[in-house]
Amino acid sequence: MKLQRLALFLPLTLVAICADPAVAAGNSPTSRALSRQQAEDSLRNAAEGEVFALVDSLPRMKDPDLALLAQARLAATQLDAEEARRWVNRYLAGGTRSPAERALAWPIVADASFADGNYQQAADAAHAWEKALAEEGANADDRADALQMATVAEQFAAAPKQLVQAYAPKPENVIRDKVGLPRSIMMINGKPQEAVLDTGANLSTVSLSTAHKLGLRLLDGTASVGSASRQAVVSRIGIADHLEFAGLSLNHVAFLVLDDDQLSMPVPGGYQIDAILGFPVLRQLQRLEFTRDGKLLPSRSNAATAVVGNLRMVGSDLYVNVLLNDIPVAMHLDSGGARSALSSRFATEHPALIKGLKTTKEHIAGAGGSRPSESALWPRVNVRIGDQQTELPTMTISLNDAGNVKDPNVLGGDILQAFDHWTIDFQRMQFEVGKPLTKPTTQPRAE
């Protein structure tokens, strides 16, 4: 479940990164160099999930400074926060930078540090990002993005660091609830608690009543950041002294604590989420296999370090390189999302495909309420991940953003459950699916 960034702040084949900025700048005589504006656009798009396109852009960047930032962003996508910070520091040390140039650099450090659990460094970088945006004259919504990251990161920086006490992988049962979300039982402070397993959540979350029930220690202070066009949600931090799940034993696990009604969804008959287990915990399982028959099979990764794979990260959001009717698309892996969907950016980039498709209007539920959405309906979409493929009867394509929040392309439960299993390996940065449950039909490809 990818919840709107400003409403909650919850809410995956990369070539080797060239270490020589001159080569990375695209000095090959056979390459077509990007203009500075094109290179900057590629960096901004990568910050919104278009990470695989940045791989193609890097060798064609004629500006060596922007090539440094591209290498920083790509290092961050491979969960190498230290390498990302080194590239940004090299960029910042290269001369006096304008506010606009600094506004390109600091969010890379903020994202990489937040995903790495270095929350104070993330907060410092986000403050520097917000300052650069203010000096640049950016609008309130853009500044609110940076300010919220700074505020939430500062809250988490005040908490004790999460520690792995032990890990002896063991299977867990997983059920699908009434809206199709995967749930399992974790133990917090010795008490069982059902939680949604959500790879799309960059923070673990509990409702306020659940925090009290489980004996979480609520830290002093609350945070609320919004803007004129975006609703602010009050949040606080709760600490679980001990958490056990799938053979993993953790101390000092920080949760974002929200009021109960903020985790209530407008679903017929009512629907409440009491707890979400997100990326900071799930990452510690190293390798997760979800089977069609309702099992989570964790294991240690066999890779000592991250290697080239098809899984990438922006902030704490996982992206997979997927082919949809032979169109390459970076899709946000969201095991807490029941349906896959494509963004308004995809619609803009493929106007010929959108033309003539049926449209629909609906309300999309999320924490804090719902929002109206208009979408096009794309029929019979062939989905290929690695060497496996399936077919979705229909995929929605958003025709409008969620206010000023840009929704990603989402790889949700309808695709994941079309295969007999799916696996995330955080150490190898690899996403794999098993055999499809139904054989896709042959159909003409549409652009």
Image (cartoon, rainbow, N blue to C red):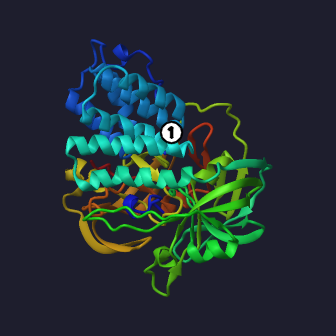
Foreground of the two, 22 or 124: 124
Please identify the residue farthest to the top as the structure is shown: 29
Q: Position of residue 44 (x, y in %)?
A: 31, 40
Determine the residue positioned at 80% across, 49% down. Answer: 168
Please identify the residue farthest to the front as the structure is shown: 220
The residue carrying mark 1 is 310
Foreground of the two, 68 or 351: 68
Residue 62 placement, left or right of 337: left
Q: Position of residue 327 (x, y in %)?
A: 35, 45
Can you tell which quarter of the image residue 230 is in? bottom left
Mark 1 burial class by Cα count in 10 Å: few <14, some 14-19, many 20+: many
Residue 131, placed above or below residue 55: below
Q: Secondary structure at mark 1?
A: loop
From where the camera sits, is residue 155 visible?
yes
Determine the residue positioned at 35% across, 36% down. Answer: 53
From where the camera sits, is residue 409 visible?
no
Q: Position of residue 238 (x, y in %)?
A: 60, 64
Q: Position of residue 369 (x, y in %)?
A: 39, 75
Residue 293 placement, left or right of 306: right
Three-letter amino acid code of the residue under disc 1: Asn
